[in-house]
């Protein structure tokens, strides 16, 4: 079963507009959530994170929102720029045991000029 | 540059052949991980090593073995490659720092694209 789900395989947004990427999870024991960005032929790179005790974290053009009751988080990018075109992975940290990240399937974001 | 280095970057194997994917990190991280990336499946954990001397299975360990050679190096071995193991393989590491957010994030290598024919 997929504990972290990104139900939109792709998203296309016009340059300058807001991009909203969504992620749902099922495990209540996740204590930290992260977003990674991946360009072709490169490894994923860390973008932004949020603790489970918070509901919002901002870093420049990027904001992550966490709704614990709905087990849902979203990444907002505003304004969107062509360089934001990439695959975005949502990830969650398992609090128990040897802590490791569980990743979603990824969403391919395309920013159109 | 500090980071995670994976070799080789590309490899084509015939079914039944064996090979080892190499990974090394120079950040003094304790934990290391092997993931595979497949279309529509995201990143799935194959094996991980929480600290030097320990290894554990992840979500998709069948057909793979690992060795944590020392603190820096964590290798992934395919003993008898199968077409289902065609994928992009990523090694990652994680350490502990005063930056709490950094304690949860991985540093990834650039990947090994493996094709099994």
Image: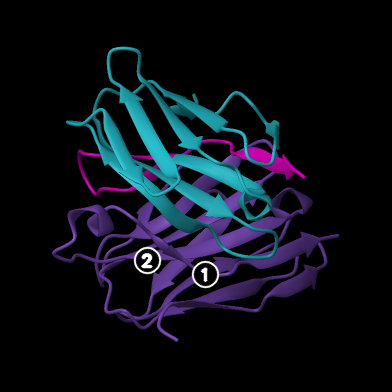
Chain colours: A cyan, B purple
Label 1 resides on the chain identified as B
Q: Residue furthest left?
A: B98
Q: CA distance from mark 2 to mark 1?
A: 9 Å
Classify residue A92 as left or right of residue A45: left
| Residue B81 seen in the current view | yes
Q: Position of residue B32 (x, y in %)?
A: 36, 65
Q: Earlier in the sequence, mark 2 or mark 1?
A: 2
Residue positioned 26% across, 71% down in the render: B53
Mark linked to residue B109: 1
Question: How many residues crowd mark 2 within 10 Å: few (<14), some (14–19), many (20+)?
Answer: many
Label 1 secondary element: loop
Front residue (pair B109, A12): A12
Q: Residue furthest bottom?
A: B1
Q: Quadrant of the C terminus of chain A?
A: top right
Residue A69, placed above or below residue A65? above
Mark linked to residue B95: none
Residue A112 drawn in magenta: yes
Task: Give a yes or no on whether discs 2 and 1 share a subunit.
Answer: yes
Question: How many residues crowd mark 1 within 10 Å: few (<14), some (14–19), many (20+)?
Answer: many
Q: Which residues are magenta?
A: A91-113
Mark linked to residue B93: 2
Label 2 secondary element: strand
Q: Residue furthest top?
A: A69
Classify residue B49 as left or right of residue A19: left
């Amino acid at each position: 079963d997929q504990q972290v789900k990104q139900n939109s395989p792709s998203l296309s947004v016009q340059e300058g507009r807001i991009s909203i990427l969504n992620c749902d999870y099922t495990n209540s024991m996740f204590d930290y959530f992260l977003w990674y960005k991946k360009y072709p032929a490169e490894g994923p790179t860390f973008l932004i994170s949020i603790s489970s005790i918070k509901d919002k974290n901002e870093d420049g053009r990027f904001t992550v929102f966490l709704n614990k009751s709905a087990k849902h988080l979203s990444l907002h990018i505003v304004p969107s720029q062509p360089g934001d075109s990439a695959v975005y992975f949502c990830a969650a940290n398992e609090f128990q045991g040897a802590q490791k990240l569980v990743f979603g399937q990824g969403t391919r974001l395309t920013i159109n000029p | 540059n500090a980071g995670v280095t994976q070799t080789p970057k590309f490899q084509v194997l015939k079914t039944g052949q064996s090979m080892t994917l190499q990974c090394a990190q120079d950040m003094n991280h304790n934990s290391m991980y092997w993931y595979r990336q497949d279309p529509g499946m995201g990143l799935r954990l194959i094996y991980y090593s929480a600290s030097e001397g320990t290894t554990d299975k992840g979500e998709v360990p069948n057909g793979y073995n690992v060795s944590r050679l020392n603190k820096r190096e964590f290798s992934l071995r395919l003993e008898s490659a199968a077409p289902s193991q065609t994928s992009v393989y990523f090694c990652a590491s994680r350490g502990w720092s005063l930056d709490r957010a950094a304690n949860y994030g991985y540093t990834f290598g650039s990947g090994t694209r493996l094709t099994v024919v």
